Amino acid sequence: MGQIFTTTQFYLHGKKHSTATGYLKHTLSYTSPFQLSPIATPIDNDQVDLTGKSIIITGGNSGIGLTLATYCASKNAYVELFCRNEERAAKAVSQITSLTSNPNISYTVCDVSLKSSIDAAISSRPTDSPLHAVVCNAGVLLNDRQESSEGNELTLASHLVFGSYYLSKVSERAFWKTSTLAMGVTNDLVIRLFFKFHLACTWGVLDRP
Ligand SMILES: NC(=O)c1ccc[n+]([C@@H]2O[C@H](COP(=O)([O-])OP(=O)(O)OC[C@H]3O[C@@H](n4cnc5c(N)ncnc54)[C@H](OP(=O)(O)O)[C@@H]3O)[C@@H](O)[C@H]2O)c1
């Protein structure tokens, strides 16, 4: 009985607050800086400028990663998508470029659940290429146990071990070359990430030019 009550409450709360309808309702109480779309318009501008900033976003070809990539592109950042599928990555790059008119969007094929793939992706970047932020967004939440070709459980490997911890660690080399550092680690905090990133820019944790 208790379980039915809890599940029903959870369902009703989620439906009210977390669907698109709930989101739009809550946006009415958001205060500045806030914008309704990943692409700022003159009326809907949060004053963030990422010109000259170089940002890697894993899993940037769909969902939250794609929205964040579009947002950063619209703020003039150099955006590099780390995606496991080349076709989906190229499609996302073309979509972001046409939406934002920012030509500095690229992709690197990278399966974040694999150490070898992260090593290859990071080594393929020019060593003197600056990097200001890595958004560790990619990952899967699987119901059944599945293993990567390296023998690691996929949810843990993609979200945490390689997709967040290892990628952050091997990116440090590039961070040292820049004066600023921002690291977004997502997983269950991903919903808040966009706003954290947004606030980091607004509050000056990420330098503005
Ligand atoms: N939305 C939520 O309510 C929620 C809640 C908790 C946690 N999260 C986490 O937040 C992140 C984004 O959520 P979302 O809703 O935007 O998810 P999504 O639409 O499923 O997007 C996930 C992205 O990650 C990519 N990806 C998955 N495994 C990968 C791998 N091994 N290597 C490289 N890319 C990989 C996917 O690429 P493909 O297109 O190739 O599959 C896709 O682009 C995910 O990590 C998710 O688990 C989301």
Image (tube, grey):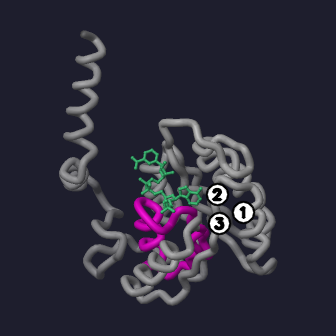
* SS type, badge 3: loop
Q: Is the residue indicated by label 1 positioned so its CB lies within 8 Å of ligand 1?
A: yes
Residue 173 x, y percent position in the rendering: 80, 65
Residue 142 x, y percent position in the rendering: 50, 41
Q: Residue at x 31, y 67 (%)?
A: 35
| Amino acid on which the number 1 mark rests in the picture | Ser
Where is mark 3, residue-wise? 110
* SS type, badge 2: loop
- In space, the residues marked 1 and 3 are separated at their CA atoms by 5 Å
- In space, the residues marked 1 and 2 are separated at their CA atoms by 7 Å
| Amino acid on which the number 2 mark rests in the picture | Val
* SS type, badge 1: helix
Q: Is the residue indicated by label 2 positioned so its CB lies within 8 Å of ligand 1?
A: yes
Is residue 25 left or right of 65 when viewed as pictured? left
**Camera-side residue of 114 and 128:** 114
Q: Residue at x 54, y 78 (%)?
A: 77
Nearer the N terminus, badge 1 or badge 3?
3
Where is mark 1, residue-wise? 117
What numbered label is drawn on residue 85?
none
* Labels 3 and 2 touching (C-beta < 8 A): yes
Residue 76, compared with residue 81, is above or below; it is below
Q: Is residue 165 visible?
A: yes
Q: Quadrant of residue 134?
A: bottom right
User: Which region is colored magenta?
Assistant: 54-82
| Amino acid on which the number 3 mark rests in the picture | Cys
Q: Is the residue indicated by label 3 positioned so its CB lies within 8 Å of ligand 1?
A: yes
**Camera-side residue of 184 and 32:** 184
* Labels 1 and 2 touching (C-beta < 8 A): yes
* Labels 1 and 3 touching (C-beta < 8 A): yes
Where is mark 2, residue-wise? 112
Q: Is residue 209 visible?
A: no
